[in-house]
């Protein structure tokens, strides 16, 4: 069985605005989040979306 890295467009569409919100929430001068709880929530959600977007797909064995 081969395992391929799949690309799920629905999670990509979710990850894009969450990533933008994460960048807006991060203060690059002080290297901190403006609101730490919201920033960590965005970060965790963004990482989960990236993981689910690039999750490996296993092929079914041929019969």
Image: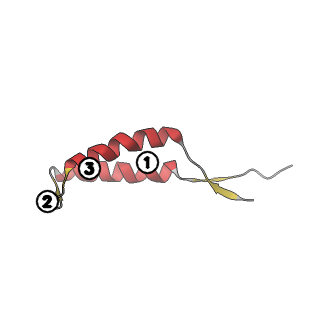
Label 3 – label 1 distance at C-alpha? 16 Å
Q: Secondary structure at mark 1?
A: helix
Residue 23's disc number: 3
Taking the image as drawn, is residue 38 in sight?
A: no
Of the residues tagged 3 and 1, which is closer to the observer? 3
Mark 2 or 1, nearer chain start: 2
Residue bearing mark 1: 49
Of the residues tagged 2 and 1, which is closer to the observer? 2
Q: Quadrant where the N terminus lies?
A: bottom right
Relative vertical location of residue 1 with respect to residue 46 in this rendering, above or below:
below
Q: Position of residue 2 (x, y in %)?
A: 72, 59
Label 2 – label 3 distance at C-alpha? 13 Å
Mark 3 or 1, nearer chain start: 3
Mark 2 or 3, nearer chain start: 3
Residue placed at 38% from the left, 42% from the top?
A: 16
Would residue 45 appear left or right of 36 to someone viewing this image?
Answer: right
């Amino acid at each position: 069985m081969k395992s391929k890295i799949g690309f799920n467009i629905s999670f990509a569409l979710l990850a894009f605005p969450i990533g933008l919100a994460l960048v807006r929430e991060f203060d690059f001068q002080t290297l901190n989040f403006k609101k730490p709880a919201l920033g960590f929530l965005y970060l965790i959600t963004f990482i989960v979306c990236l993981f689910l977007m690039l999750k490996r797909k296993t092929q079914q064995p041929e019969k």
